[in-house]
Image: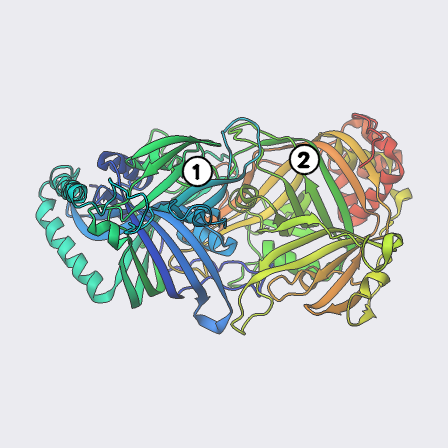
Amino acid sequence: MPPLRSLANPSEPLPLFNTACSAATVAAAPPFAFPNVTMRIFPLPADFHALGRFCDQYLNVAPDFARFRPSMPFVMLTIVNYGRMSVEQGNLGWTSQNEVLFGIPLEWYEPREGRWVFRDLAQVAPFIFVDNEGSQVVGREVYGWPKVQGWFAGEVDRWAINPRSRRRLMRLDTRLFKRLYEGKRPKPRELLVVEEEPHPSFSRFPPQVDGPLNPLLGLQKAMLGWTTLLSQGVESWTRLQLGSPMDRRALPDLVAGMLGSLDSVTASLQANTINLKQFRDATTPALACYQAITNARMEITQVHGGGLLGDVALLSGDPSGGHRIQLHRYSAQPIIETLGLHVFDENEGDEGRVSILKPTLPFWMKLDLRYLAGENVCWRTDTLPWRNQSHECVPEATPSGRPPPALYTTTGSAGFEVAAGPFRFPGATARVLPLPADRRRLQALCDGYLNKDPDTGRDNDVDYFQVWGDYVYLIIQGFGAMTSESDDVGLWADKLIRFAVPVRWYQRTGAGTEPKLASVGLFSPYVFTNSDIQTTTAREVNGWEATAATIEPAPSLWIDEAGPFAKVRPLVEVQTELFPVIGEGQQSRWCTLFEVIQGDVAVWQKRGVWSQPATGKEPSGQGDAGSIGPAIRRLVASLFLGEQPLNHFSLKQFRDTREPLRACYQSLVRIGTIFERIHTLRAIPDDLHVAIHRYPTQPIVDKLGLTVHSRYATGLGAVDCVRSVRPFFLRADLRTEPGQTLACRAGSTRWQRPPGGPPPAYFTTAEADLAEDRAELEEAQGSPHRWARAVTNWLEPQAVIHALLNRPGDLEAGPRPKEDEP
């Protein structure tokens, strides 16, 4: 193995994780305390070679730093109930969670003096399902656990129908495509069921001749069951001796290392959890912008109890303890095929094939856990080769001189959890509510989020963003049909709501140079979606601060005391999980974050305890429509005619495994959206208000500097009402462009441009359009960037919106909008 060389200063700190948009959000820094955790573990027999192939595909991607192999032909199906999960520092709050994971026991090897030496025992869990969105985000983005959303479904126990039926102990549902590439939406579907055979009965009538209590048959079944268990143990040890792909000289080290590892586990009660942490690249989603092999240690602080499951069945010779696992087969979750699980039986269910698995010696434990700080065994980016925690790497020779591409691995439960584009959304709808705001507050947010380094407070030396206008736009989007140009798995997007801030984008061509206006666009500090895949795609590909939420029509007041003639009508209600207060050790819960209401807001406020008018002046938002010349209108209208993309800018960042308060990867990303066809562009009546509830972990009004029309209070706290100015409805065919990484940094505080730098993104215009406004043409003297002075000096988005809504003829250059109702 070639010698290691250092490519970076290991003493240089990582950049701080940027929390400008949500400074009060709970920091995800260990240690985490998990008291009274209950685990039910079902060892499932599996093919040893299949597990070895999985390790090669999923973990053995950095062969110069670490190698892993299965330690036994079993997969540990573990069902965990976390009674209380909390961050130890600051008493910020706590939450609860249920979890189902398929874990593989591992042997961990590392290179020493040209040979592989056993380092420790570990476990990897390629399939994980949790019912807590916050845990999913932290698990994926800090440690690399491939967590997806699941639900523990309740149902009437079969005992209520027949006391001799198998009892359903647990049922796991998750959102799944029934079949991939059929153009359908994923739905909650049953994935896994744990059943238990009824206990033997002495008094059953008529007697059960072949029951386990019959001594003639029971002894035979017991001998067969325990013989099978013994044979599995012999097979496991044989494969351990003969099936190792490592150097034979490592065998003595392996035995000594395993004994030492077991001794350390029993002495300190700690265990390693290995993960592949990875995120799709915005430009080429088939590649990963960042990958790392991570390890996190779980410490058992106290054991409260434990034992085997199904003692009576075990005594009768059934190694499964009378349990069986029903696992549905879906192409989006190929658990059996990936892990080589042994199938006891199969049958056809309503949704397809259902496999029956038999565990071996299932058991349970109740204990207190403490999750410690993790480590990056090794990491790489799309432009940097693999390196260890000290930034030492092994040069990887390629004809181009660049490291080989970092392919995004789709093995495991997260394989189809992140969608790969570009995408087309025909018939997408958007309801846009302009909300007046304080430009100084918006610029402070923009500086903290996009422009300045949180460590030093200095501007970055790449791109600069300046707030454009005095409005924040609440955009409520709905998606119907959709296609992907790279991996068209199905209809994964549904509803999306975001608070978007218009900005001017300036590029620096070199250090110390004056930034030049390149284009305009939006950045969205608050994004909410009601689709699991949409949330992870927005976060891990686009870099948006997306949060899972329920986006539903608000409860109607038609049957309320106001009657059918109420002067106010609630339209949309958005709920999400959050901490209502912090620092008080309270549990997180689902709360209403904001509502869109129509009508007389004073009637709506009567629901509260008190109300008061807000201070501050609301801008009219009408703009000087007459000052916008035809050429400028045509330039801006070109956004709606597919000639120019509507840019969306974001800071894509992920927390480091060892130092979660810092970022292992950050990049400035631009996503372009093309309007291929406008179907409808119409104004909405102005009597729309957004009622935003105040929570310290979602400081929307304060961060955006929204101009509050009035305030009132409910039993859940204060609510700010913001009046929308000139809202409108849009229905169009949309197409997203491949994303563009403007600059990035990993393992360093220095920003770097991608190879070749970002291409220019200036608006252009034809001479015929320039001739439409001779006065502006003479002032610009034929400059192709004439629009830049207008955008910089006097043109604002709200004025353009006002002009376009008043003069739909400005869109005549493209498909005429249809006069249908929204």
Q: Name the residue under label 2.
A: 645
Q: Name the residue under label 1.
A: 415
Q: Which residue is drawn at 16% across and 61% down?
A: 263
Q: Residue at x 67, y 60 (%)?
A: 700
Task: Tell me the SS state at disc 2.
Answer: loop
Is residue 751 among what the camera can see?
yes
Residue 369 percent coordinates (x, y): 35, 64
| Total numbered badges shown on the rendered structure | 2
Which residue is at the front of the view, 412 or 616? Answer: 412
Looking at the figure, which quarter contains the C terminus?
top right
Which residue is at the front of the view, 566 or 635? Answer: 566
User: How is the protein colored in the picture?
Assistant: rainbow
Q: Distance between the residues labelled 1 and 2?
A: 30 Å
- Nearer to us of marks 1 and 2 is 1
**Farthest residue toward the front?**
206
**Left or right placement of residue 529 versus residue 81 in this view:** right
Q: Do the residues labelled 1 and 2 touch (CB within 8 Å)?
A: no
Residue 677 percent coordinates (x, y): 73, 28
**Left or right placement of residue 774 versus residue 178 in this view:** right
Q: Name the amino acid type tagged 2.
A: Pro
Which residue is at the front of the view, 721 or 499? Answer: 721
Is residue 10 among what the camera can see?
no
Residue 264: quarter of image: bottom left
**Farthest residue toward the right?**
626
Residue 440 percent coordinates (x, y): 72, 61
